[in-house]
């Protein structure tokens, strides 16, 4: 089931996480956060100059809001609607990148590697705290962003 977090300029300018908290916390309370059909999506509704060529991930107020969200829920990538491209967009909010109309998002390789390792460690610890010892979805997440992590790393984290 798709869950949508809608952000307005007010949320972004005040770093107000309420729209996300109101969607995520009930999922956590009901024990449904890890169900594969959660599929969290973000909609950013802001007024923009139509001549502004920047992507949302290039707007400082949008990036800062997502950095704050990621600090609160470092395991959030597991809940995103990957098939709708939310994982790539979320990563773009947190990882330096270039955008090309022909090639799409091209992440800074070193920054993406650091992001991925931080996510692996944070998400593995969160899964363990939830009583989940399988890292299948986490491994699939890394593959979605172009990394094939050896199972030996996951064995170290158990």
Image: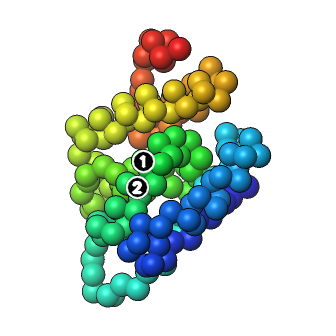
**Residue occupying image coordinates x 38% and y 74%:** 13
Q: Secondary structure at mark 2?
A: helix
Q: Which mark is residue 11?
A: none
What is the tally of numbered marks visible in this picture?
A: 2
Instruction: Give the residue at the far right of this rendering.
Output: 30
Q: Is residue 152 visible?
A: yes
Expressed as whole percent of the image width and height from the top left, the position of residue 133 reads 62, 20
Could you say which is closer to the camera, residue 56 or residue 65?
Answer: 65
Q: Colour scheme in the image? A: rainbow
Number of residues whose C-alpha sits closer than 10 Å to that of mark 1, classed few (under 14), some (14–19) or many (20 or more): few
Check the image and report above or below for 16 versus 114: below
- At mark 1, the secondary structure is helix
- Please name the residue that numbered disc 2 is placed on: 68
The residue depicted at 45 percent of the width and 78 percent of the height is 10
**Location of mark 1 (residue):** 71
Seen from the viewer's position, the closer of residues 10 and 62 is 10
**In this picture, is 129 found above or below 79?**
above
* The quadrant where residue 115 appears: top left
């Amino acid at each position: 089931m798709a869950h949508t977090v809608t952000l307005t300029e007010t949320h972004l300018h005040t770093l107000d996480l309420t729209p996300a908290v109101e969607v995520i916390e009930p999922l956590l309370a009901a024990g449904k956060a890890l169900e594969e059909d959660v599929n969290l999506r973000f909609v950013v509704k802001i007024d923009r100059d139509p001549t502004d060529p920047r992507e949302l991930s290039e707007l400082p107020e949008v990036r800062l809001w997502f950095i704050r969200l990621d600090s609160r829920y470092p395991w959030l990538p597991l809940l995103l609607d990957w098939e709708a491209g939310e994982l790539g967009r979320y990563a773009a909010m947190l990882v330096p990148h270039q955008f090309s109309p022909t090639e799409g998002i091209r992440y800074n390789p070193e920054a993406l590697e650091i992001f991925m390792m931080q996510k692996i460690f944070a998400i593995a610890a969160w899964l363990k705290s939830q009583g989940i010892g399988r890292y299948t979805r986490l491994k699939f997440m890394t593959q979605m962003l172009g990394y094939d992590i050896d199972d030996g790393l996951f064995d170290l984290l158990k």
